[in-house]
Image (cartoon, grey):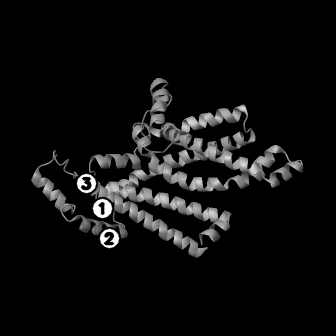
């Protein structure tokens, strides 16, 4: 088991390194600089030259890459051109907001998705199953940013039920020091988390329905029914427990996907997380911030996959035997 985990860990590190390398070179080859575009300089040429020298952008790209990797290995992600502060500090401000958004969306995703999947499997090929299946397919086919814009227009602009952006009321709840401010944070969180969670729940429900239908047809489920157990116990205790294995893999992929997929949702709802930070940094040609967000995002994806592999192998030892 330990050798199997070491191999998975080595592969994860290689994937992160490849993602960071690709991001680094693509950003530097795309053109532009912290001074502005090639044909529109926002500062004087002599000032731009000093800035490029200060941040090492006047050195050959391979030298910049080597220095960047050496700095990352020592825990230094560089200085932000745009914010004029360490990149770690910028990520430290944005990361909690993204984790709160992704964590809440993940809770909505799997709570609603598993419930709908079990309900559909229990009523397979009936009206409720067909209606929910079509509704899930419709929601799953919608881009998250478009769904976010629709929810924002209906519940924020027309009905005025929720705020249209931000994480909190900057005047009344600048700090989280009362129950009212906790409610204010949840109020601001509702729409962006629901946008991400609904799209994820639609996919989770389809996966869980298929897994439940496969398990329900097996002999041990028929034996449980023959013993006179209630249908609810048969479904929730015997069938669901064995139908959760595919969802373990889906869970391992869902959280990093929600973190990285929140880019457009954070932009739509003015949610100051990693996605919003990355979009702003791209516009400012802030290479260190963009590369650091790619590093964190790829790290989350690989860690999520690694944890899913470990949990899956622990649940079914045949997986690691075949992968040995």
Image quadrant occupied by the C terminus: bottom right
Label 2 with label 3: CB-CB less than 8 Å? no
Residue named by callout 2? 70
Nearer to us: label 2 or label 3: 2
Distance in Å between CA atoms under marks 2 and 1? 11 Å
Local packing at callout 2 (Cα closer than 10 Å; few below 14, some 14-19, many 20+) is: few
Residue 265 or residue 14, whichever sits in front: 14
Which residue corresponds to mark 3? 81
Which residue bears the numbered disc 1? 78
Q: What is the crowding at mark 1: few (fewer than 14 residues within 10 Å), some, or many (at least 20)?
A: some
Residue at 54% from the left image edge and 41% from the top image edge: 199
Q: Quadrant of the N terminus?
A: bottom right
* Mark 3 surroundings: few (<14), some (14-19) or many (≥20) residues within 10 A: many
Q: Nearer the viewer, residue 172 or 197?
A: 197
Q: Is the C-beta separation of discs 3 and 1 under 8 Å?
A: no
Rendered residue at 14%/48% (across/down): 43
Can see residue 86? no
Q: Which mark is residue 30?
A: none
Name the N-terminal-most of marks 2 and 1. Answer: 2
Residue beneath the point at 55% across and 44% down? 200
User: In this image, 241 relative to 306: left or right?
Assistant: right
Secondary structure of the residue carrying tag 3 is: loop
Compared to residue 311, the image places residue 182 above or below, namely above
Q: Earlier in the sequence, mark 2 or mark 3?
A: 2
Give left or right: position of 232 versus 154.
Answer: right
Q: For numbered disc 2, what is the local secondary structure?
A: helix
């Amino acid at each position: 088991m330990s050798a199997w985990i070491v191999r998975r860990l080595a592969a994860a590190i290689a994937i992160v390194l490849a993602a960071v390398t690709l991001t680094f070179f693509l950003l530097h080859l795309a053109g532009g600089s912290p001074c502005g575009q090639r044909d529109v300089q926002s500062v004087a040429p002599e000032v731009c030259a000093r800035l490029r020298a200060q941040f090492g952008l006047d050195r050959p790209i391979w030298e910049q890459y080597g220095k960047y990797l050496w700095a990352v290995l020592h825990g230094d992600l560089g200085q932000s051109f745009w914010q004029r502060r360490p990149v770690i500090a910028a990520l430290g401000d944005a990361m909690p907001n993204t984790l709160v958004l992704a964590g809440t969306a993940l809770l909505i995703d799997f709570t609603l998705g598993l419930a709908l999947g079990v309900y559909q499997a229990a009523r397979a090929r009936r009206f409720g199953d067909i209606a929910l299946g079509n509704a899930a397919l419709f929601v799953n086919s919608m881009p998250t940013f478009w769904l976010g814009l629709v929810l924002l227009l209906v519940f924020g602009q027309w009905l005025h039920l929720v705020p249209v952006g931000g994480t909190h009321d900057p005047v009344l709840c600048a700090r989280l020091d009362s129950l009212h401010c906790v409610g204010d944070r949840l109020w601001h969180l509702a729409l962006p988390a629901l946008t991400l969670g609904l799209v994820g729940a639609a996919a989770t429900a389809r996966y869980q329905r298929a897994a439940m239908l496969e398990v329900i047809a097996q002999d041990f489920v028929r034996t449980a029914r023959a013993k006179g157990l209630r249908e609810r116990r048969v479904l929730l205790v015997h069938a669901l427990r064995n139908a959760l294995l595919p969802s373990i893999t889906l869970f391992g992929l869902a959280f990093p996907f929600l973190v990285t997929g929140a880019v457009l949702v954070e932009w739509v709802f003015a949610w100051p997380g990693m996605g919003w930070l990355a979009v702003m940094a791209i516009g400012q040609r802030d290479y260190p911030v963009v590369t650091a967000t790619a590093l964190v995002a790829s790290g989350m994806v690989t860690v999520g996959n690694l944890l899913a592999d470990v949990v899956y192998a622990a649940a079914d030892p045949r997986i690691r035997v075949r992968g040995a």
